Image: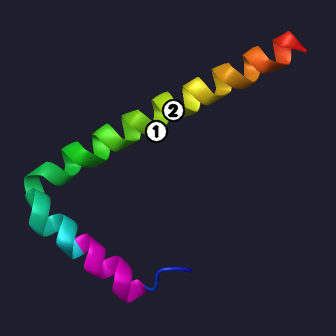
Amino acid sequence: MSLGITEILLILVIILLLFGSKKIPELAKSLGKAKQEFDNAKKSAEKDDEQQK
């Protein structure tokens, strides 16, 4: 199940309508920070698993 270009554009338009053009950069920034924190926690958990072995 993959998304085509039409579906992606429709999703982006809906996001634009819901959040407005001023909120989208803030939303992207917070999503980036959340992804970075998740990656850091994942790396930390993997490092802990390796040390326990």
In this view, 8 is above or below 15: below
Local SS, label 1: helix
Disc 1 to disc 2, C-alpha distance: 5 Å
* Tag 1–tag 2 contact (CB < 8 Å): yes
Residue 51 position within the rendered picture, expressed as x and y whole percent measured from the top left:
83, 11
Q: Quadrant of the C terminus?
A: top right
Instruction: State the residue at coordinates (35%, 88%).
Output: 6
Instruction: State the residue at coordinates (84%, 11%).
Output: 52
- Amino acid under disc 1: Lys
Residue 49 position within the rendered picture, expressed as x and y whole percent measured from the top left:
79, 19
Q: Which residue is mark 2?
A: 38
Q: Is residue 13 left or right of residue 38?
A: left
In this view, 10 is above or below 51: below
Magenta range is 5-12
Q: Residue furthest top?
A: 52
Q: Quadrant of residue 39?
A: top right
- Amino acid under disc 2: Phe
Q: Which residue is mark 1?
A: 35
The overriding secondary structure of the stretch rendered in magenta is helix
